[in-house]
Amino acid sequence: MKKNDQIIERLEHLNPSKILTWTLLFIGSIVMVTPIIFMVSTSFKTGQEVYTLSLFPKSPTFENYIFILKESKFLIWLLNSLWVASFSTASVLFFDSLVGYTLAKFKFRGREIVFVAILSTLMIPTEMLIIPWYMMSREFGWIDTYWGIAFPGLMTGFGTFLMRQFFLTLPDELIEAARIDGWSEFAIWWKIAMPLVIPALSALAIFHFLGNWTAFLWPLIIVNDPDMYTIPVGLASFNGEFQMDWEIVMTASCLATIPTLFVFIFLQKYIIKGIMLAGLKG
Amino acid sequence: MIKSFWENLTINQKLAITAWFFLAVPIIFYVTIRFYPTFEAFYVSFMKWNLLGTQKYIGFKNFSRIFGDEDFWIVFWNTIKYAIIGVPISLLISFTVAYYLNEIRFGHQTIRALYFIPFLTTAVAMAWVWRWFYQPMPIGYFNIILSWFGIEQQPFLRSVEQGLYSIMAPAVWAGLGFQIVIFIAGLRAIPKSHFEAAEIDGAGRFQILREIILPALKPTTVFLVIISTIGFLRIFDQVYNMSADSAGGPLNSTKPLVLMIYEYAFDMYKLGRASALTVILFLLLLFVSLLQLWLARDQYEKK
């Protein structure tokens, strides 16, 4: 009975303008993903069929994927990207939260200065630092190394600020109690405070990983050796080489995009919540 | 010896030492990877320097040469165009979508996810897809679709007039999902009682939008305007990977500041000139950030 009432109530709420709104929004959302859909569909097409607007390939083929994996260094680039992004994300999670925690929960002289100094780095655009970073990398031999790609992003002002905001909300009594029980300061942070801010940590992890995965300018500068390319730099290098074979280029673009989409499907809730959190706190 | 020293300290002293111990590695990082390079960027902007030679102090000459360069002004206005046209268009679309999407329940999450997906893509990968769409017949889908309606072929990326907008489109497209999610969060944060009160007063839909929703969303809007303005002023990936003829072409018509910095620094190795350009970019972004502080001033005063 109750269910019936609910349905009737819902139907009463339905009116033509609402249906129109829904339809327009739905069409818009399909338009938004159209480029991605055609990218995927084209990656399964043969060279001849690329020029037709068909959504489903007549005879789907994996040839393009086999070609990419055999003829280009895509797999190496994928591993490079994965390694750099993971290393960088791990570092950011550790250090940004350690600094954020220290600035939120310790009282000591100079705390404000450190906080303002770290916050002020947010005003400096990366583009301003790439030339000094490049000089530094030449000097120390960091060009064409994983460290060279990763080092500028190992700690971030944004992450530190975000984590500090979350640690501020934890009650001081919790930490005091652990101190009285004889916990070390490091253990209090790692074992008590950190588990309580997991939502913030996962938001930061997702943001930072995605940012690294798609980063282009710095890897383009610091890497010359094709064996050290990350995926975006590798994709850009297709310019000229396979330029006219759109199905090959689409396959590579597809391989670059699919991993993040998969992650999104599984973590959708956290990602959307994370963005809302970060957006509102920041 | 050390142990007795430690035990003689007060609790607060111990905590302060622990804090500095935790901050030691990060402070080294921030000093060497952030502050020193910032200082160096300003310093080099007053030098004549081409990578292999020695640095020579030339005062403001890099800046005066930049301001006397016609190409710089083309690039500067291109950069401003990306922001001044891109930001209002993307915010208008994303607000409209968020406003209506917030009202529907059926399929809400799925539709929101579809709008959001482009945000997760790699700009370089999507640059290829859009570049393909922009191709002339018989390859490019846009021109194929135009031909159905009997509209003549458009040059898109190959034209001086259309190039910049053709490159702006995927940048707008990729950012919409983020803005929609933030707008929806903002809309949901408006207390329900506001709407109820307005309805009792007999306010119409448009009136509610204008008098309740838009003022309540001001902080959200300011945040998004600044974030996306800064994003568009720093546009690079799309231009580098999409523009016709050469990066920033045709005829520099799509070239933004960051691409010019890249060319001076890493194609021509004129590091002094490139650094001076980064200082100009910094000042431009600083101006935008200060604008945010000024726009959001009531908010801070209230807090």
Image: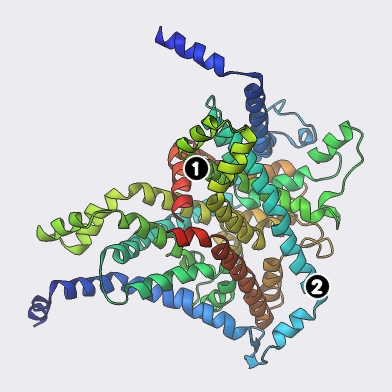
Q: Alpha-carbon distance for marks 1 and 2?
A: 42 Å
Q: Where is mark 2, residue-wise? A: B71
Q: At 45% from the left edge and 58% from the top edge, which residue is drawn?
A: B302
What secondary structure is found at the residue carrying circle 2? helix
Q: Residue furthest bottom?
A: B57
Q: At 62% from the left edge and 26% from the top edge, which residue is drawn?
A: A22
> Residues at marks 1 and 2, common chain?
yes
What secondary structure is found at the residue carrying circle 1? helix
Residue kind at label 2, given as amino acid type: Asp
Q: Residue furthest top?
A: A1
Horizontal relation, residue A281 to residue B270: left or right: left
Horizontal relation, residue B270 to residue B71: left or right: left
Q: A14 or A40: nearer the eye?
A: A14
Whether residue B2 is visible: yes
Q: How many marks?
A: 2
Where is residue A29, by image quadrant? top right
Q: Nearer the viewer, mark 1 or mark 2?
A: 1
Image quadrant in which the N terminus of chain A is located:
top left
Q: Where is mark 1, residue-wise? A: B185
Residue kind at label 1, given as amino acid type: Ala
Q: Position of residue B73 (x, y in %)?
A: 78, 72
The chain carrying label 1 is B
Horizontal relation, residue A39 to residue A77: left or right: right
Horizontal relation, residue A46 to residue A119: left or right: right
Q: At 71% from the left edge and 58% from the top edge, which residue is drawn?
A: B84
| Precedes in sequence: disc 1 or disc 2 | 2
